[in-house]
Image (cartoon, coloured by chain):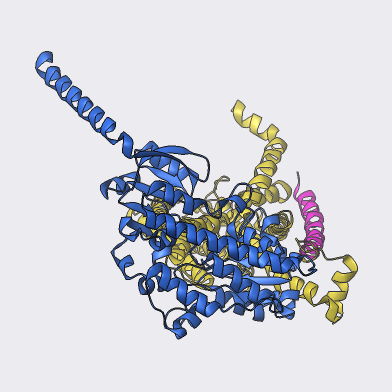
Amino acid sequence: MYKKTFVPLLVALASVGAFTGCSNSGNQNNQISVTDMVGTTITINKNPKKVACISRTTYDLLVAYGLGDKIDGAYKGTLNNSWVPLIYPESKNHYVYEYNNSAELFLSRGVDLVLAPEKYMADDLNAHGVPALCVSLYGNPTFDSYVTFLSQLVTKIWDGDDIKTKASAWENKVNTAINDVKTELAKHELSKKKVFYVRGDKDRGVCYTDTKGSFTEYAYRTLGFDFVGSTLSTTQPSKEEIVAQNPDIFVCGGQYQNKNINILKTEEPYINLDAVKNNKVYNIPIGFTAFEQLSVMTPIFFYDQANKIYPKYFDYDISSMVKSSIKEYFGTDVTNDQVSYMLNGLNPEGGSLY
Amino acid sequence: MNDKKIKKRTIIFLTASIVALLIFFILGLMLGRFNIAIDDFFKAIFTSDASLDTQRSIIVNLRLPRTIMAAFVGMGLSLSGLLYQETFRNKLVSPDLLGVSTGASVGAAIAIVLGLSSAFISIFAFLMGLLTVFVTVMISKLFRNGSSTILLLSGIIVGGFMSAILSLIKYMSGDITTLASITYWLMGSFESANMSRDYILMGVVVVCIVVLLLITHPINLVNQGKAEAQTKGINYNFYRGLIIVLSTVLTAISVCFCGTVSWIGLVIPHIVRLIAGRDAKRTIPLCITFGATFMIVVDILSRTFTDSEIPLSAVTGLLGTVIFVIILIIKRRKLNEHKDI
């Protein structure tokens, strides 16, 4: 009885082992060890064909580098943006993922790489046999050395001269933008001022920001500011805390930016703050992604904010830059009106994004 | 202890607690993350000095509404805890006994998932809280047995069911920010306080308190059980129903504006009974002042020491457990007697 049951079982197991061994050795040349943003090193297959972009900074760059057909899906917060299907119509074919997804879902969809926003997600997926890399929204301790991290990671994972050329061009543009702004600002004696960034990607009102380690903290520090969020222990400070900080400037991003700007300008206790009284409340454009997220629009984000915050020193033609960048990275022509809506935080029809 | 002594002690504690309530109410307006000097505080209130617009705005628009809300939520939850404990003759029951808080939580969670505004979150929470208690009462009626135990059991059943629904909603909310919003709401906060909400809360709580003060005698009789109450000639079922309705409304109106707040409905009635015994004429006024003061202190602690607000339940939990241990130590002798029995 035992013999009848176990002998075929052992044979079957041995066969599976043999086949697995063969396939492993066959794939060794196609594998690569990569280290993600939080320092975890994993071995993955090169040139993955079905990528899940759960981290919100990843979808944009992959599409821009011509890897849109390698994407299986993206986080719903990324895809539920009316600019995305306009700029990249193929996005309609991409699966809409939740923030937290089971390993089984990825396995059932045949996903061969997940770009996860948090370490625990990536660890959990790797433990369950789904290759995952953490592309965090925060650097440790700051974002300074992570600005081009994703771009470089992409060129490691995917072969192709075209990808490398695009990545290199984008990285150059980012560095040029940062240097341009820094060089000009260095010419002037500017007193250190406080900026409060209102996130606005969720309807959480004015009391929602980024903390130390975020890309926005890096960006506004580069633009010569003390970033209020870097002194906070939470992304959701109280109203009193914001009043106590009394920032010199408010910058509002995300799809709820116009709602938040209106709150700042009309509601107590914000109307008494220096930034509001001095009319120093600025918006951040939003297109395929919010410009303050690390994306192909990052160079333009620096120029746009420099224009708004320091109109005496900067006067870049942001509309032309946006138009040509969208054409260059996504192959789409946008009208002047659409660019104007983008710059004003509106949807492609000029209406509200929320 | 004779009645005269208890009466005297009640008057002393009531007077002291009224004074404490006034002091903490003013402290509630003075303290917070934004530092306001004492002279600036009084100038901001009593003058129209334009240089103090920010301070005035913080006091009037941020601190006043939430301090009023804290006071009335404290009154509401303490009173409903007291009434439930006395009516069901069980000192360990809380205002959530009949599922009102879990029902309100389900209502709020649905509103949050639907992306509705905070006003609708409150409306959903209030209506769902009341609906849950209605279902509890209906289920208890299926047993055709008017005993409090059956009502208690129905409350546990419906509360458990609502907890399961809440877990399901949290699971299905998917988006981590929605889940975080639900979780944060469940922990309680006075962040959304404003004067229009305060007017509604004050109106409901004041009406309930007036009715309760008018029926203190029937409350005392209901607390002694059905047989005793009927012997004394009161309509037991009517008054018990009325007490449950008032307690439920007090809990629902409190929870719908600030989320669930644990411990206060358990701790304050115990403190009050230690001082004034079980006479509703004494316990109700003390519950009002003690509950309001306790909640104002909790609110000050929750918003003063960190750059975001500490959830109310975290603060009430920390304070409540410590106070409860102290109450148990005070009652030690009594507990030991029970052990001997």
Q: Is residue B12 magenta?
A: yes
Answer yes or no: is residue A104 visible: yes
Prevailing SS of the magenta stretch: helix
What residue sits 42% from the left and 63% below the top? A78
The foreground one among A32 and A262 is A32
Q: Residue furthest right?
A: B39
Left or right side of B202 for A110: left
Q: Please identify which colour was used for chain B in the image.
A: yellow
The foreground one among B10 and B263 is B263
The foreground one among A63 and A55 is A63
Q: Is residue A304 magenta?
A: no
Q: Quadrant of the N terminus of chain A?
A: top left
Chain identifier for the blue-coloured part of the image = A
Task: State the image coordinates of residue A59 (x, y, percent, origin top left).
Answer: 41, 59
Left or right side of B334 for B85: left
Numbered range of the magenta stretch: B1-28
Left or right side of B258 for A246: right
What residue sits 39% from the left and 47% below the top? A157
B319 versus A127 height, above or below: below
